[in-house]
Image (cartoon, coloured by chain):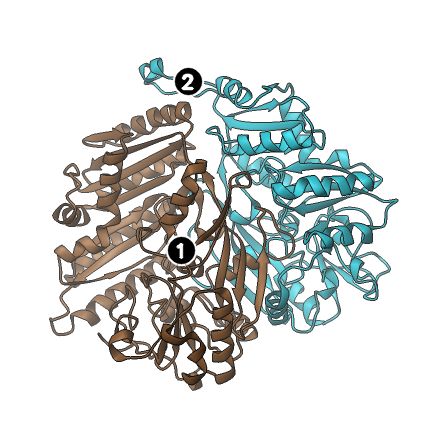
Chain colours: A cyan, B brown
Amino acid sequence: MSAFVASDAATVREAVREGEPLVPVGGGTHSATVPGPDGPVRALDVSGLTGVVDYDPAELTITVRPGTPLAEIDALLAANGQHLPFDPPRLGEGATVGGAVAAGVTGPSGFAAGIRDFVVGVRFIDGTGRLAMSGGRVVKNAAGFDLPKLMVGSLGRLGVITELSLKVFPRPEATATVRFPTVGLPAGLAAVAALARAPIPVTALDLAPTGTVTARLSGVDGPKSADIERFSAHQHGGIGGRAERLAGLVEPGGAALEDEARHWDEGRRFAWVGEDARLVVVPLAPRQVVALDADLERHGARRRYGLAANVAWVAWPDAAPLADLSELLAGQAMSGVVLTGSSLVGRSPSDPALDGPLIGAATGGAFGRRIAGALDPAGVFAGGAR
Amino acid sequence: MLHALDGVGERVLTSGAELAAFGSDALTAFYERPLAVVVVESGEEVAEVVGLCHREGVPFVARGSGTSLSGGSLPVGGGIVIALNRMNRVLSVDPDARTAVVEPGVINLNVSAAAAPHGLAYAPDPSSQSVCTIGGNLAFNSGGAHCLKHGMTANHILGLRVVLPDGETVELGGDSTEHVGPDWTAIFTGCEGLFGIAVEATLRLVPVPESVRTTLTVFDSLERAGDAVAAIVGAGLIPVAMEIMDALAMEAAEASVKPGYPVGEALLIVELEGEEAVVEEELGAVEGLLRECGCGEMRTTADPDERALIWKGRKSAFSAVGWLAPDYIVQDGVVPRTRLGEALREIDRLSAERGIRVANVFHAGDGNLHPLILYDGREEGAVERAEELAADILALCVELGGSITGEHGVGVEKREYMRLMFSADDLALMEDLRAAVDPGRLANRGKMLTPPAEMGATSATGSAS
């Protein structure tokens, strides 16, 4: 079915009020969440809803339309010494901010700055065609239900976002990365636990199935304070010295990783997933890693564990049935979201394991069904996900 | 209804004397007499009592320590109060995952105490943290002085077990910092009890910082203190807290807890925490900026006792203004941080115009104002005049692009002001969400949203105590 192209909130409303199943699509880089051309669900193209509505760097917030490319926001923020600390994945050139929030995935360098903590305001059109606002442009707000956070990970199933307000942070002047030796998965997990509790805050903490740990920290190059005397009794706060200290916090110690910016740039593009596999994001707790890893190994799926073992990034091979992964996750009470590969929108409801990009255990239960039912009583967005 | 509660036996309170303590919370202008208070001991008991309320059509309100400043735990007249204080255990701490699983009646500060042996802490720190409970914190998405760096309560709740208003128990979220699908945990957090009762929560813990430095300084005007805050943020620094008190609030603090603050028109507290070398580096930058902004006497300390005294003065500010006037209204408005100066000037003008004293205490780093409106309830019309000023201040906050509440919640106190912020459609959508989860509108009826007339809930003004 041909896409409905939205030019503003009014045309979004028009499309929703037609009542046919649809899913909002931005840059289309989360290909598994985009309706296929021949499927029963229509794409609502919101890539034209672009532009920065409001940005005052001193506020540390930015308000944008959903189709605004992340690259454009990055450039604007960088010019003002700021950035999006949740490091949203960039799975393609056209990745948009609306897509980042709808997918709800924190990138590799977003440890301790999860995307859910940075969405403070939203305007959206719900399934009845109603334009609603929740939250605002201030960073602290307890008025009314927190719909901005609800939208994080919603995959367009609860409404079409027409405007977003995000918290932003100062951009660190310098970054450094330390790689620790390969020690096997259990010892790697122990190292991750130790580093996550360490006095040196890290922005990324990755673990490979081999047990190799890669940690990133950010800060300043060297002392900038005019009050240099102060540092005579202290190690100064420059990034080099801090990276050295981090490298020595666990045994065996690590070493600085060269060309670290490129390493993390590739990380947020998930280039390692390759063309013959789908990227599946699976939240978990560190204690669940070992059992899941053995299952994934058996199925020939490459994987990495990020954000201090709070998430598994899985490259599920196209050759293996996705239903197997869904079943495997459900068996361990885990859920996942499939971001890439062929469309998973509007598949046959007779194959419930594959009726959307969300796989594994269902989330929200009766509570989720009631909230979703209130926002989308006729199921206009139901094609997007369960 | 009461007969059906027999199973809970002696933990059902029904006598006038027993109920009296539950008729109000920290917003003492409101009082309602419940039918009964049920002191529950488990999630199953909560589900049982809520299920019973659902079948009988009796409204219920969950209550922890009753410290809500917005009347959030005010009973519904003739309804049931479900007291959660006995569900006060920290069930587990996972140091490797940096999480804790707790019951809702656990006191905020006790979570950090349980986490401390692992070098971890629970970050959200409402001023009432030594008595308030996690259940209330999460129901109202509480804040605290350290939100600037750590965010509000919602950022620290990873998973919940909740009893829905029909008695069904569901699990939301999990024990990861990440989630897939809509963030059900986040929308439940801050629902002010309208979506049900959380009976277990998985909390995110943070490492105890290696170094904490608290700097205290004074300025000759509030505006200059505000400029200093803007300069610090503008330099790319995110302190863990930045607090301002005006002269009246300082006077009140000195009169009550005697923190020994320096003398000035405005007091600024800046706290930095983290890695020692970085904190020292940032402290140098902060002190330099404060001097450039024309600060007076400045003290910086790492000493836990001195820090505790500085914070005691700040955190007791609300109760301390009791030394200045017999009664006061605490407000909780938010403005964009760049408009703080404008907001304070306007509050000052309104205060002078009405001849009503206003003490200002605020979380300057995130634009969260706590104007304390002082009055004497014994004077004819004084309450009404104070409430009028409070309403004008909230309208001002919304006009400047802010919010009617940053961390206390709407409760029964501010629901009339929701329409200042939200359109009829926005409010209708919230009511639809509420009705979908709780068609009988039994869960904490009368809070946040104005109930439909036929529900016969608490009147807008309540009954004075």
Chain holding disc 1: B
Check disc 2: other Cα within 10 Å, few if <14, some if 14-19, many if 20+: many
Between marks 2 and 1 in the image, the one whose residue lies nearer the viewer: 1
Q: Is residue B412 above or below residue A152?
A: below
| Label placed on residue B106 | 1
Image coordinates of residue A15 in percent, x first then y, are 70, 66
Q: What residue is at 41 percent from the left and 25 percent from the top? A: B278
Q: Is residue B162 above or below residue B23?
A: above
Q: What residue is at 52 percent from the left and 28 percent from the top? A: A218
Q: Residue furthest toward the bottom?
A: B454
> Camera-side residue: A210 or A86?
A210
Q: Secondary structure at mark 1?
A: loop
| Label placed on residue B377 | none
Q: Quadrant of residue A234?
A: top left
| Quarter of the figure with the C terminus of chain A | bottom right
Residue B363 appears in the rendering: yes
> Camera-side residue: A14 or B332?
B332
Q: Amino acid at mark 1?
A: Val
| Label placed on residue A236 | 2
Chain holding disc 2: A
Q: Residue furthest toward the right?
A: A319
The answer to whether A37 appears left or right of A27 in the picture is right
> Camera-side residue: B4 or B313?
B4
Residue A313 appears in the rendering: no
Image coordinates of residue A314 in percent, x first then y, are 74, 41
Q: Quadrant of residue A73?
A: top right
Q: What residue is at 50 percent from the left and 41 percent from the top? A: A168
Image coordinates of residue A267 in percent, x first then y, are 68, 33
The answer to whether A172 appears left or right of B340 in the picture is right
Image coordinates of residue B330 in percent, x first then y, are 26, 59
